[in-house]
Image (cartoon, helix red, strand yellow):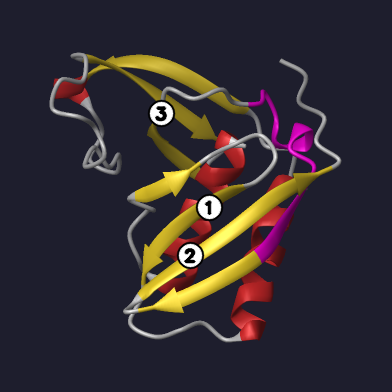
């Protein structure tokens, strides 16, 4: 589910120019992420988010991690969600060339293990879009 969250975050950045989700709740059965947008997305745009995430999943991208000193973090890595007491050593997750970010969660080794990404509901109020999603046919076993 963490890997799917990364793909969703990057897809939202690319489609809407927004920041990664600052408020998310990731669980095995279903998860949610919040995004701040100027306008409520249309039904077609919501379907396109799901379609784009599934297209990236189908590319069978490798997922790898590495440890890096916080002072040597590449400019494209957003550290704004890190707590003040975060370790000096960070774990970065790379999903092919599509996404990279700091994360401590469990991840698949290849996007093919994710299964199908499904948006199950959305809410929009006061500029905040909440997306609830789940995975179907997930092959992740760890």
* Residue bearing the label numbered 1: 32
Q: Residue sitting at 59 percent across and 36 percent down?
A: 27
In the rendering, at what x and y percent does residue 88 appear? 18, 14
Q: Residue sitting at 49 percent across and 25 percent down?
A: 105
- The span picked out in magenta is 108-120
Q: Is residue 51 magenta?
A: no
The answer to whether the residue labelled 2 contacts the one labelled 3, judged by CB atoms less than 8 Å apart, is no
Per the image, label 2 sits on a secondary structure element best described as: strand
Location of residue 83 by image quarter: top left
* Residue bearing the label numbered 2: 130
In the rendering, at what x and y percent does residue 85 appear? 15, 20
Q: Residues within 10 Å of mark 3 (few under 14, many from 20)?
A: some
Taking 29 as reference, is 52 above or below it?
below
Per the image, label 3 sits on a secondary structure element best described as: loop
Work out whether residue 98 can be spotted.
no
Left or right of residue 109: residue 8: left
The numbered mark, 3 or 1, whose residue comes first in the sequence reads 1
In the rendering, at what x and y percent does residue 81 appear? 26, 39
Give whichever of 108, 32 is nearer the camera: 32
Work out whether residue 68 can be spotted.
yes
Give whichever of 55, 138 is nearer the camera: 138
Q: Is residue 114 magenta?
A: yes
The answer to whether the residue labelled 1 contacts the one labelled 2, judged by CB atoms less than 8 Å apart, is yes
Q: Quadrant of the C terminus?
A: top right
Taking 1 as reference, is 130 above or below it?
below
């Amino acid at each position: 589910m963490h890997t799917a969250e990364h793909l969703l975050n990057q897809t939202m950045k690319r489609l809407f120019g927004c920041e990664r989700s600052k408020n998310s709740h990731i669980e095995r059965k279903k998860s949610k992420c919040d995004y701040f947008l100027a306008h409520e997305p249309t039904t077609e745009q919501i379907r396109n988010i799901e379609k784009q995430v599934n297209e990236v999943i189908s590319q069978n991208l490798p997922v790898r991690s590495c440890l890096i000193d916080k002072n040597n973090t590449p400019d494209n890595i957003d550290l704004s969600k890190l707590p003040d007491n975060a370790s000096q050593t960070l774990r970065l997750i790379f999903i092919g060339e599509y996404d990279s970010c700091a994360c401590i969660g469990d991840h698949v080794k290849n996007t093919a293990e994710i299964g199908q990404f499904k948006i199950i509901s959305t809410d929009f109020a006061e500029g905040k879009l909440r997306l609830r999603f789940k995975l179907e046919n997930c092959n992740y076993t760890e």
